[in-house]
Image: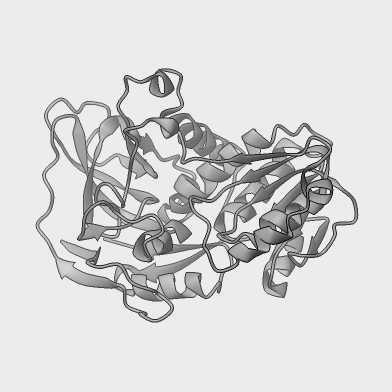
Amino acid sequence: MKAMVLEELTDVTRNHAPLKLVDLPVPEPGEGEILVGVRACGVCHTELDEIEGRTPPPALPIILGHQVVGTVAGRGPGAVAFEKGERVGVAWIYSACGRCRFCRSGNENLCPDFRATGRDAHGGYAEYMTVPEGFAYGIPGTLSDAEAAPLLCAGAIGYRSLRLTGIEDGQSLGLTGFGASAHLVLKMARRRFPRSDVFVFARSEREREFARELGAVWAGNTEDAAPRKLDAIIDTTPAWKPVVEAMKNLEAGGRLVINAIRKEDGDKDYLLDLDYPMHLWMEKEIKSVANVARRDVGEFLSLAAEIPIRPEVEEFPLEDANAALVELKQRRIRGAKVLRVG
């Protein structure tokens, strides 16, 4: 099978070809696993974090990719949940222990033995992959492969982030950064909270214009002041500056939800500008989002089919995965980037 493989950590700014196209044997599904013939795989900023060493894979080489849509091509011993040929998706959560208090409460995302697709196990930048059947999801027939792929991470993590804001209909929501996840959150928020206004903070005018097209009542630059204080803000960026700027725009008792697996160090000095009375006082809160649980993925896929949510996608052949990653690094973004596979 063809696969785009990461063999060594590198800086994508200097190395525009971090992944190598190779031929590998098709993997064999083990006990309770299914073999997935990959048809599409989303490209995520987390892949840049892996490649550049901010959240490095425990071993190399590794096949990246955790927004995977394909069909069941084989079943290992004891795998009975899906029929051959059935369309399935694989998300960031590849497996968890199933025994700890987090797993027993449905919060597998916090499991000490959490394993991530495309980091701790081979992912979807390939023609085939295996996954435990309990961590695969049926894909609604109303969604194409390319539309479904970003929903498995950008959508599911956005769904969890929106849930963690705790907002009610009529309260105001801010989104800082406007890439794959945030544009899906905006679509969700407008459906679930029709009386709530959504405000967007983004660096590029192209992103701000896109936000207005999707229904944002206001869109400004990262450091701009919103027309009014906001009840909750979701930060989807890899930087520190938007965190500090967002806190200035929060209403008393407001909550900032940080949807990022890592923050880059390039603007870490911006934290020195943190001022307690301006940014944190009046019972403002900061809450991080850690991974996704199976509940998030399953519930969001059902919601996306019901609304329906159609993400904006830009498609690339598998062999052009490096080009997609470079564009993501350079923030040439409108919606989500998806690899066509198989």
- Identify the residue at the far right of this view: 227
Q: Residue at x 47, y 38 (%)?
A: 292
Q: Indicate the position of residue 32 as horizontal and vertical percent values.
A: 19, 29
Q: Residue at x 35, y 64 (%)?
A: 51
* Quadrant of residue 78 within the rendered picture: top left
Q: Residue at x 37, y 50 (%)?
A: 66
Q: Indicate the position of residue 264 as horizontal and vertical percent values.
A: 52, 62
Q: Indicate the position of residue 229 as horizontal and vertical percent values.
A: 87, 48
Against 74, residue 80 (above or below) is above
Q: Indicate the position of residue 233 as horizontal and vertical percent values.
A: 72, 47
> Horizontal placement of 24 versus 172: left or right?
left
> Horizontal placement of 72 versus 268: left or right?
left
> Horizontal placement of 126 versus 135: left or right?
left
Camera-side residue: 187 or 114? Answer: 114
Camera-side residue: 263 or 114? Answer: 263
State the quadrant of the C terminus.
bottom left
Against 200, residue 319 (above or below) is below
